[in-house]
Amino acid sequence: MRRIIGIFTLALLLTGCRAEQPPAPTATSPSQPTAEVFATSRPQPTTTFPGEQVFMPILPGGEIATTPTTEPAITSTSSSPAATPEPEYPAYTGPPLNRDGIGLQIYLHRQDVRDLLRHLEALDVGWVKVQVSWKLHEPRPGEYDEELFSELDRLVDGANGQGIKVLLSVSKAPEWSRATTEMDGPPVDYGRFEAFMRYLATRYTGRVAAYELWNEPNLQREWNGSPLSAADFVELIRRGVAGVRAADPAALLISGAPAPTGINDGINAIDDRAYFRAALAAGMAGLVDGAGVHPYGWANPPDSRAADATQASSSHNNHPSFFFADTLEDYHMMLVAAGAGDLKLWPTEFGWGTFDGLRTDEGQPAAPPPGSEFMADNSEWEQAIYTLRAFEMAHEWSWVGPMFLWNLNFTAALGPEFQEVGYSLLRFDGSRRPVYRALEWREGRR
């Protein structure tokens, strides 16, 4: 692997101008979690929406202090006056954040599980999310990759030992089960999915608290080989639910979250609101314990809305899909309209990406890859402030369940040509970004 994550290196253990046109129909979301991330060779770079570069101001108002705290001063042996330490992270002064409402997605393959667990402990998260690429975990019918499963076993056991709940997000059918091998998609026979989910629930009975059934099914790249269909997706959920509940009735079942894209061509993507509404009409709410949602903010502050008269970000500011609060509130209103207002929304991915503070192997500042220019609108500082505020907002909404920040450590597997790393809490060298430190030292913890 490219790098090994570390926690506490001393111990070696540890988007104002409005866009004139909507984005081109690339049908992608801010995160591009590809199954090949788990393979030994790197995947090809993925793309997201184009954006123009402009600096975004720090989010005003709220309970988040804009005056940073500092690390304890290091005693100097020099007679020269000591320089004031540079601020390393923003201070959160809002109400204490409920540990059970904070989750984090990690990259697991060939990582030191002990180090991952130390990160989870330092951040005091209540949940950890791991993506299970079905096609890699069951490469042939009934045969399972024990290297991948042994890594998952260790992570599950370690998280349980620390009182951290586990969410497994399962998608990407094996090639042997599909009508085409292009992109990713569902199996021809949904019974195959039921069987795999039963296998997982049997292996992890009582140890995995929740399962997310599929990922971003409104995108062609995740549902190729069959027309995009919310009704078909709900049928897949039905089979997955049956598989899990046959083995572990106590496990929670979460519907796979649609991708917010601002695209609705019916081929590359179906608008996430239209798709979610259609899934509810097909009976999804009666099958699951929570509804998955991906309320990414692109470069828009969490409190901002698409209807605002002015926008801070330079692109991706002309559609509600690009706004954290709009997405969550719209989904909740759809649940209420469907008579399912008691069903909680589970943000199984969210976050703000930036390449600020990231450097290449040659020590040069890294820049967002093509298609991810919107990340230049955010600094590391703003990434931290927006994340803290998002957690605070969601804690005020009783209809929001655990929120999973994307991601801890994809810098351990991918290089600067991949936009996933802009969301990581750790830099390429394993050092902690301000968002990490702000979560680590949030009010009520220390």
Image (cartoon, grey):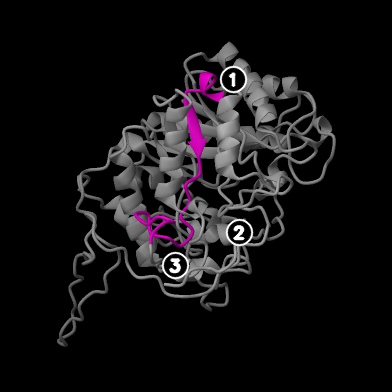
Q: Which residue is mark 2?
A: 414
Identify the amino acid type marked 1.
Val
Q: Residue at label 3?
A: 313
Identify which amino acid the numbered label 2 is placed on: Leu
Amino acid type, mark 3: Ser
Residue 295 part of the magenta segment? yes
Measure the C-alpha gap from mark 2 to mark 3: 27 Å
User: Residue 222 appears at what percent x and percent y?
Assistant: 69, 42
- Range of the magenta residues? 284-308
Figure check: 400 above or below 199: below
Label 1 crowd bin: few (<14), some (14–19), many (20+), radius 10 Å: many
- Gap between marks 1 and 3, in whole Å? 40 Å
Indicate which disc, 1 or 3, sits on the residue closer to the N terminus. Answer: 1
Dots 2, 3 in contact, CB < 8 A: no
Residue 404 seen by the camera: no
| The quadrant where residue 266 appears | top right
Sequence-earlier tag: 2 or 3 = 3
Depth check: give the residue in front, 142 or 283: 283
Q: Is residue 124 left or right of residue 127?
A: left
Quadrant of the image containing the N terminus = bottom right
Residue neighbourhood size for the residue with mark 2, other residues' Cα within 10 Å, grouped as few (<14), some (14–19), many (≥20):
many
2 and 1 marks in contact (CB < 8 Å): no
Task: Work out whether 12 lies above or below 445.
Answer: below
Residue 125: x, y in percent? 36, 41
Query: SS class of the residue under badge 3?
Result: loop
Q: Which residue is mark 1?
A: 241
Q: Is residue 298 left or right of residue 369?
A: left
Looking at the image, residue 2 lies above or below residue 191:
below
The local crowd at label 3, few if under 14, some if 14 to 19, many if 20 or more residues have their Cα within 10 Å, is many
Disc sitting over residue 249 in the figure: none
Image position of 173 with respect to 252: above or below? below
Left or right of residue 138: residue 94: left
